[in-house]
Image (cartoon, coloured by chain):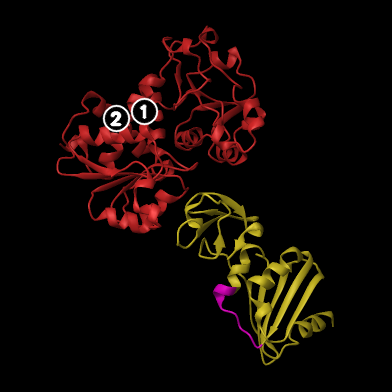
Chain colours: A red, B yellow
Amino acid sequence: MNKRSLVSISDIGRDEILTLLEQAACFERNPNRRLLEGRVVATLFFEPSTRTRLSFETAVNRLGGRVIGFSDAANTSTSKGETLKDTIKMVSNYVDLIIMRHHLEGAARYASEVTDVPVINAGDGANQHPSQTMLDLYSIYKTQGRLDNLDITLVGDLKYGRTVHSLLQAMRWFGSRFRFVACPELQMPPQYIEFCRTNGIRYSEHVEFSPSVIQGSDIIYMTRVQRERFTDIMEYERVKNCYTLKASMLEGARPNMRILHPLPRVGEIDRDVDDNPHAYYFEQARNGLYARQAIICRALGINPADI
Amino acid sequence: MTCDKKELAVAALRNGTVIDHIPSAALFKAVRVLGVESMDKYVTIGYNLQSSKLGRKGIIKVADVEFSQDELDRIALFAPTAVVNIIRDYEVVEKRPVTLSDDIVGIVRCANPKCITNNEPMDTHFHVVSRDPVVISCHYCTCSVAGKDAHIL
């Protein structure tokens, strides 16, 4: 197992997070430094994800590395019944780094245990997506100048949303306050409430997405209600538009407030918000490139400051 | 006098193992996990016996069998109060509680159908996150389960 693998956001502590954010800022100033000359990286996407895969592949390409891989398990020997272990061991012969997405939870953790090549988890089922968390942190850091002492409001699907769970796990190192806004069926699950209590994270739970909540926020993190998580379609239809953010709701918001969304968005942010200065979700997606470059360099033991 | 009676009850075996202080609710699971049903030795099973410690308890007495440490510690997941008495020549030569190690490998099945451990030939691995009550979490998918609800393989 390679110690520089990144499988879960809880693999890295406060200092490493801050170092990665500084490096992401470096890469934003220049994303085209040829730090990965001569390196080959595998993007193994057993489950398709165009956005994340393109972001990682761009990150490698702009750093001068080469990419091999696949974007769908149907095109691989997995469809012939090959075990994940065998696939990872085979690919490990060819590459310096593995970036993988898989529909099963724990797949990336297992992969990191069967190879000495570092593994970056690009999403394993409903479990973790640490590079998303890093780009979220970078976006917050960039727009607010800090991670501590902020008012962060999480809205929408707090029950199944892996991005909000991960963000909470990362934010335990920084003393910010959280508001959880969700309809009763999609509230933050008990184990995360317990996590907040155990880690001294201040939080409050709300059902109403009220003006006072919006005006009291530095960051509003909107999430999509994921239809694919519901077994009962009628229940999904009832809650899917629980909270829609419209431009008119932004009056009186703090000037520094920014609206984040892990994308894709469906109905939860109205189109009329896109041109509002508080909207940040598209820049947030672009920050993914720089955050991923920082994560890739960490995985390969490359310190950009040394070069 | 009461003490003697109690000791006699436990040492009624000539040689064998007595597992005492099993919570009643966990008794039959313990019987299954220890594979007692497939043994051909003399076995006594007590259920819903009075217990000052537990209210109601279960007890398993198996003649001529000494279980391995691993086998006995499996029941620590759902019967952490259990006490093992090894009997030799009518004497209790050893008396110790079952122990729950911090990591449990290959014994418990993960309840999450989307966990990699249920879809790939590999050992399961759980961490003990709480001992009272016993709660374990999957090393791979991080799903937690109470020890008493754990599915023992």
Q: Position of residue A286 (x, y in %)?
A: 33, 24
Q: Secondary structure at mark 2?
A: helix
Q: Which residue extends farthest bottom?
A: B89
Chain letter for mark 2, please: A
Reply yes or no: does residue B66 show up in magenta: yes
Q: Are marks 1 and 2 in contact (CB under 8 Å)?
A: yes
Which kind of residue does numbered mark 2 sit on? Tyr
Q: In this image, B41 relative to B67: left or right?
A: right
- Would you say A290 lies left or right of B78 here? left
Which region of the structure is painted magenta? B64-71
The answer to whether one can see residue A1 in this image is no
Give the main secondary structure, helix, strand or loop, of the magenta stretch: loop
Q: Residues within 10 Å of mark 1 (few under 14, many from 20)?
A: many
- Labels 1 and 2 within one chain: yes
Q: Residues within 10 Å of mark 2 (few under 14, many from 20)?
A: many
For residue A138, the mark is 1
Q: Is residue B44 magenta?
A: no
Residue at image coords 50%, 51%: B115
For label 2, the residue is A290
Gap in angstroms between the C-alphas marked 1 and 2: 9 Å
